Each structure stands twice: as structure tokens, then as C-alpha cells.
Amino acid sequence: MKWIDYNEKLLGLNLPVFTLREALRLSGLNYDTGRMQISRWVKMHRLVRLKNGLYALKGPLDRGKIPAFYIANRLYSPSYISLESALSFYSLIPEIAFALTSVCSKPTRKFSVMQTSYVYRSVQPKFLTGYVVEKEMGFSIRLAEKEKAVVDYLYFTIVDKTDPLERLDLGGLDRKKMYGYASLLKEEKLMPLIRRLC
């Protein structure tokens, strides 16, 4: 398959980040031939290998046309943006998060892609809830609700035995919703911490 045709097909489907399986399905090539073709395009700097089996179109990636939150969702799935990244997004903390932080049901992982750090913290699958799907630049992004981002953050301060940020701005949050999310975790120290901060 010619690069120009393949590139247009991916852009037409709004799929600038894709798996090897998706690439093979779109190209119609068998596994070995498709994998070799993808490898060639990576060497030619037309594609960027984000991790084993996940690729991005280099042009849109270099021009900032692929939101970092979308890359975070695709890099390690199922996951959603939460913790410091979501708190910063909602202006619940004054600073910008250093790394893109997400919550997932897989083991905790860290990735570095194009000088951006992606950090994934693990929770039980039943706690992988409390997120909404937002649109950014035409891409669907899974992002924790404000209250869930706070509960996720407080939960990991207990797990990591660190102090919660004093600069958390919790005004206007739905306490009942926070208590509901916290009850899923069955972490005895979480409810008193929420009561103290709210």
C-alpha cells in the first residue's frame, strides 16, 4: 500500500493513533507484510512508535494535532485522565501537572513519549468509573469527573502515605458524589479525609 493512500485513509477515519491490528485491518495486508511496512514507515519518520504495537502519524503528532489526553487514553487502556492532570484541568490545583496522570485497571505503569511522561495508577476494575467522555479537537477523551478526580487523588495519598495538597480548591464539589465514589474503595481512612477537607 502506498503511504499517501494509507495516510489519507487514517486521517479520513480520524485515526492518527492506531494499533498494529487496526493498521492490518485497514491495509488488508497479512501480519508479516503489514508489520514490515509499518516498520519501514517508522524508519522513514512517517510514523512514530508510541509503544510496542501502537503508532501515531508523525505529521499530526509533531504539529500538536493529537491531544495528549487522547494519546494517554490510547497508550494504556482501559484508562481515564485523573489525579493531578484532571485536578489541574478543572483548576482544582493552581499548578500544571508535570506528567499526564491516569487511572487504569491494569498494573501501574509509566511511559515516556516524545518528551512527555504518562503515569498510570492501578485500581480495581470496579473502581474504574466516574469519568465522562469529552471532545477535544474532534477526539473522544475519557476524563474523571471533578469529584472522582479528587477521590482518586485522596485515595493515592493514603496508599502512598503522603499528605494531600493544601492548595486543593474543593469549593462547589458534590460531597455526596465524592462519598459515593469513596465507598466503592472500602478504604477506611478515605471518608474521614474527605470530611476533613470538605
Image: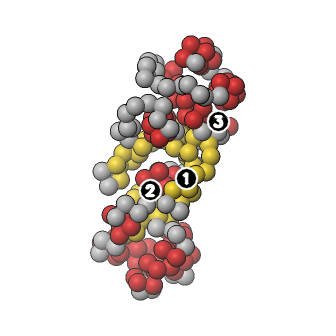
Q: How far is the residue under mark 1 from the one under mark 3?
A: 18 Å
159 or 192, nearer to the observer: 192
Mark 1 is surrounded, within 10 Å at the Cα level, by few (under 14), some (14 to 19) or many (20 or more) other residues, namely many
Residue 136 to residue 98: above or below: below
Q: How far is the residue under mark 1 from the one under mark 2?
A: 9 Å
Earlier-in-chain disc, 2 versus 3 = 2
Mark 3 is surrounded, within 10 Å at the Cα level, by few (under 14), some (14 to 19) or many (20 or more) other residues, namely some
Residue to which mark 1 is pinned:
141
Answer yes or no: do the residues labelled 2 and 3 have beta carbons within 8 Å?
A: no
Answer yes or no: do the residues labelled 1 and 2 have beta carbons within 8 Å?
A: yes
128 or 135, nearer to the observer: 135
Q: How far is the residue under mark 2 from the one under mark 3?
A: 25 Å
For the point 40% across and 78% down, which residue is it?
A: 37
Residue to which mark 3 is pinned:
127
* Amino acid of disc 3: Phe
Residue to which mark 2 is pinned:
67
Q: Position of residue 6 (x, y in %)?
A: 46, 80
